[in-house]
Amino acid sequence: MAIMYALKSSDNEIFEVEQKVIEQSETIKKMIEDGAATGEIPLQVSSKTLAKVLEWCKQRQHKTVENENDDNKGKRKKERDEDDDIKEWENKFSDELKADKDVLFDLLLASNYLDLPALLSFLCQLVADMVAGKMPEEIRRMFNIENDFTPEEEKAITAEHGWAFQP
């Protein structure tokens, strides 16, 4: 029988989650090890964001691959199939986040807060891929960032770091 924990979002929604799923979070894992995870575990993460975090963790949880026989060809094929399934899921997950940048940035903050290195790395790469080859003005539009540089400041920055402003 799996050990379950109750995670309480910042907007008071409760998520019942298996220990092996939430132990991917170093923050929660340490709470469990220190005995501080009794009852509901309060987290400073909204329910919408926490649901996405848990979706990631459930998808990425380490599963023991049990093979009824020792056929290495069968095992390699099963691993390739699982890798293809994970890639397909990651692509869908990425597309959802690209479409809703608020969720993307909330998820970035949550993955850092919960100490989920694999998710944080995945999200940083996603953002890096999104901005690659874009000019500063395109990036500002993409992420709704206000340009707070005066024309003089922008000219000075461009002169000093011109290489950074080339596509």
Image (cartoon, grey):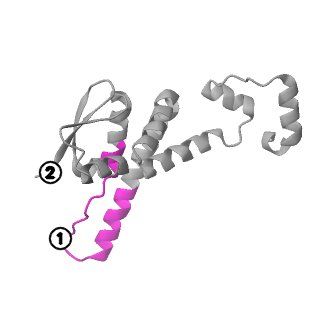
Residue 85 rendering spot, x and y as whole percentages: 37, 51
Q: Amino acid at mark 2?
A: Ala
Q: Amino acid at mark 1?
A: Glu
Q: Secondary structure at mark 2?
A: loop
Dominant secondary structure of the residues highlighted in magenta in the image = helix
Q: Secondary structure at mark 1?
A: loop
**Could you give the CA–CA distance between mark 1 and mark 2, rounded to whole angstroms?**
23 Å
| Mark nearer the viewer, 1 or 2 | 2
Residue at position x 36%, y 28% from top? 46
Q: Is residue 64 visible from the viewing direction of this image?
A: yes
Disc assigned to residue 118 = none
Residues shaded magenta: 56-83
In this figure, which residue is indicated by the disc labeled 1? 68
Q: Is residue 103 left or right of residue 23?
A: right
Q: Nearer the viewer, residue 95 or 150?
A: 150
In this figure, which residue is indicated by the disc labeled 2? 2
Other-residue count near label 1 (Cα within 10 Å), few / some / many at <14 / 14–19 / ≥20 = few
Residue at position x 29%, y 70% from top? 74
127 magenta-colored = no
